[in-house]
Image: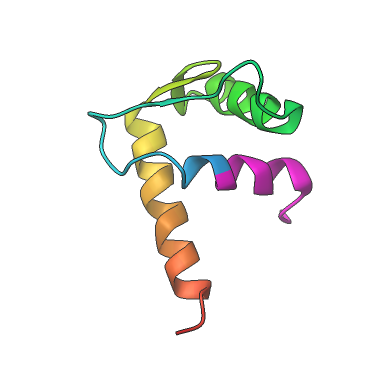
C-alpha cells in the first residue's frame, strides 16, 4: 500500500488530535472539503466518534500514536 492523497489527508488530520482520549477535535462545516471528507473516512473506519471529528476511539488513539511516531521518525533533526 502506498500513501495516496486520501491517506495522507487522514494522517494529517489524525496528528491534529490531542494524544489523549479526553480531548476531541471539531471539523467545522466551513472547513475545506478535503478535511471534512478525511474526517468522514476516519469515522467510517472507526477511528473517531463523529463524522466531523469528536473523540478518538481506542483504535483511533492507537493510530494517532503510530502516526505521531512515524512523523517523529521521518522528521530531520
Considering the image in quadrants, where does the C terminus appear?
A: bottom left
Q: How many marks?
A: 0
Q: Residue at x 35, y 38 (%)?
A: 61
Q: In the figure, 21 relative to 13: above or below?
A: above
Q: Is residue 2 magenta?
A: yes
Picture quadrant of residue 22: top left
Residue sitting at 62 percent across and 21 percent down? Answer: 40
User: How does the figure colour the protein chain or chains?
Assistant: rainbow
Question: Is residue 12 toward the left or the right of residue 62 in the image?
Answer: right
Rendered location of residue 18, percent (x, y): 33, 41
Direction bottom: furthest residue: 77
**Of 60 and 14, the residue lying toward us:** 14
In this view, which residue lies farthest toward the front?
Answer: 30
Q: Is residue 9 magenta?
A: yes
Instruction: Kindly identify the residue that appears in the image at 49 percent across and 41 percent down.
Output: 14
Tell me if 73 is positioned left or right of 19 in this view.
Answer: right
Left or right, 27 with respect to 38, comes to: left
Quadrant of residue 64 within the rendered picture: top left
Main secondary structure type of the part rendered in magenta: helix
The residues colored magenta run 1-12
Q: Position of residue 34 (x, y in %)?
A: 73, 32
Q: Position of residue 60 (x, y in %)?
A: 41, 34
Amino acid at each position: 500500500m502506498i500513501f495516496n492523497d486520501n491517506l495522507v489527508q487522514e494522517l494529517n488530520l489524525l496528528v491534529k488530535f490531542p494524544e489523549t482520549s479526553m480531548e476531541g477535535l471539531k471539523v467545522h462545516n466551513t472547513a475545506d472539503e478535503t478535511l471534512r471528507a478525511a474526517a468522514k473516512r476516519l469515522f467510517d473506519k472507526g477511528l473517531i466518534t463523529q463524522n466531523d471529528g469528536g473523540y478518538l476511539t481506542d483504535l483511533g488513539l492507537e493510530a494517532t500514536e503510530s502516526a505521531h511516531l512515524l512523523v517523529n521518525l521521518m522528521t530531520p533533526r
